[in-house]
Image (cartoon, rainbow, N blue to C red):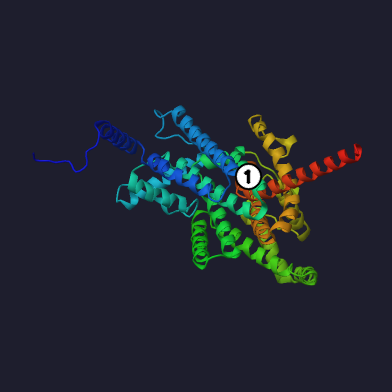
Amino acid sequence: MLFTPVIELPRSTVALAAAVGIAFGIAYTLSPTTVVFLLVAPWLFVWAQRGLGPRERRWVLGALGLALLARVAAVAVFFLLADHFSQPYAVMNGDERFIVGRSLWTLNLALGRHVALPDYVWVFSPYGRSGLITALAYWELFVGPAPYGPHLFNIVMWLIGATALHRTVRRSFGKLPALVGFATVLFMPTLFFWSISKLKEAPYVCLMAVTIAATMTVIRGGPVFRRLGAAVIAALALMAIASVRPVGVTVAVGGLAFAAGAWLVTRRAWLATAAVVLLLAGGFWALRQPPVQSRLLSEANYAAVVHVGHVRSKGYSYKLLDRRFYGPIWNVAVFPVLEPAEAMRFAGRAVAGFVMVPLPWDIPSKPALALLPQQMAWYVMVGLGCVGMIAGWRRDAIFTLVLLGNILIGTATIALFNGNVGTLSRLRDTVVPQVIWFSALGGCVALEWAAGHFMKGSTHAHPR
């Protein structure tokens, strides 16, 4: 006998193992990204349920599982309904074709393959450059062209970001606000769409969430190696944010700087009072200085030019400047200069527009009416978010300031440089997840107060 088996296995086990291996090989040949996705997803569930009680674990894993299945089903339906005879791959948004195409052009150029001149120019163009494109090119280097792979890649990124913030919020604000916010981040319609698209919103939101969560791990203390590891993760996430969306570094670092400064000056009442007085006096003095006025007006004019460019782009627009800036003839070289009062009105309208646009009575089209319920829910979330900030300050002041700083700096970088409804909605949704956690806490506090008030009224109405 030439061969003696070391381990004797039943034929059924051998047949099952062979069938599994063959199925795995076929699946990996058809879609390597899908196989990797299915191997990574279980680890996300293991991480999400760590440290949770039995009842809370069921809710969290149920929400996460439903979110995952809904997203995979949406991508599968999109793939099956796409017309693959008239196009190489389908897209949900026009920018997706540019992202996938540019990643393929980058890969072909790196491998020494022929690239058309327009595509060659786009590979090195600073416009639209993103680390997501480079990451997709590297991924396709190992697994081959994967035009639908970014959908699964972004799903994982979004779920990682939501889970990281859920675990952080749970420790700071409590179990119920964390669970309510977690479900909202997972199932809010526009956030759901960004999480399954090929756009860079999902990686950006994920990296911002990881930065916040890792920073809070460093601040909260614990074992030295754990804090050092969290610091390294936060630094790597910031580097990745810089490649995905450069202004995101300003948002992340600026938000943390705001939180640190606000926390220091609010340790004592007299220190907070002195800081407010100094800021008001120093700001009033600085605004009267010609160099400061010139610099602020220069920045306001730059923002105004970008805003008008958005207004004149395709799609539905909204206006923030005075009427004279929207004349029939417009050129950057002869763009009107803002006066100080006009710049102040521009800034005020920009902040208001960030919250209010699109106005319910000014929905641009009938299909857009489908988003009216979400827009009304957004107004409610903003109101509850203000309540949540106060409640959050009482529960965990540091984390509250970190979230608030991220929201304020993010709003400042978005509000002034927009004039297109679609672009604003897309960029605003990079800040919405942070607002959701405040609104979830505010909603829980409001319900708790209402229940207590009702019970108190019932006790007075029916005394024993």
Residue at 37% x, 51% y: name it: 138
Look at mark 1 in the image and give the residue it sits on.
179
Q: Residue at (60%, 44%) from the top-left corner? A: 56
Q: Residue 231, how many percent across, how many down?
A: 52, 64
In percent of width and height, residue 218 lies at 56, 64
- Place residue 54 in its image quadrant: top right
Q: Does dot 1 land on a helix, a strand or a loop?
A: helix
| Between 454 and 356, the one nearer to me in the picture | 454
Residue 196 % position (x, y): 51, 40
Q: Which image quarter holds the C terminus?
A: top right
Percent of width and height locating residue 26: 31, 34
Of the pair 161 and 301, the residue shown nearer to us: 161
Quarter of the image that includes the N terminus: top left
| Within-10-Å neighbours for mark 1: few <14, some 14–19, many 20+ | many
Toward the left, the furthest residue is 1
User: Image height check: is 189 above or below 131?
Assistant: above
Q: Residue reaching furthest front? A: 464
Q: Is residue 132 visible?
A: yes
> Is residue 19 shown above or below 436?
above
Inspect this view and state whether residue 424 appears.
no
Q: Amino acid at mark 1?
A: Leu
Residue, x 72% and y 49% (percent of image)?
385
Looking at the image, residue 229 sits to the left or right of residue 120; the answer is right
Q: Name the residue nearer the viewer: 212 or 377.
A: 212
Q: Is residue 257 left or right of residue 17?
A: right
- Vertical side of 236 occupied by 66: above or below: above
How many marks do you count on the picture? 1
Lateral position of residue 373 relative to residue 247, left or right: right
Residue 307 falls left or right of residue 233: right
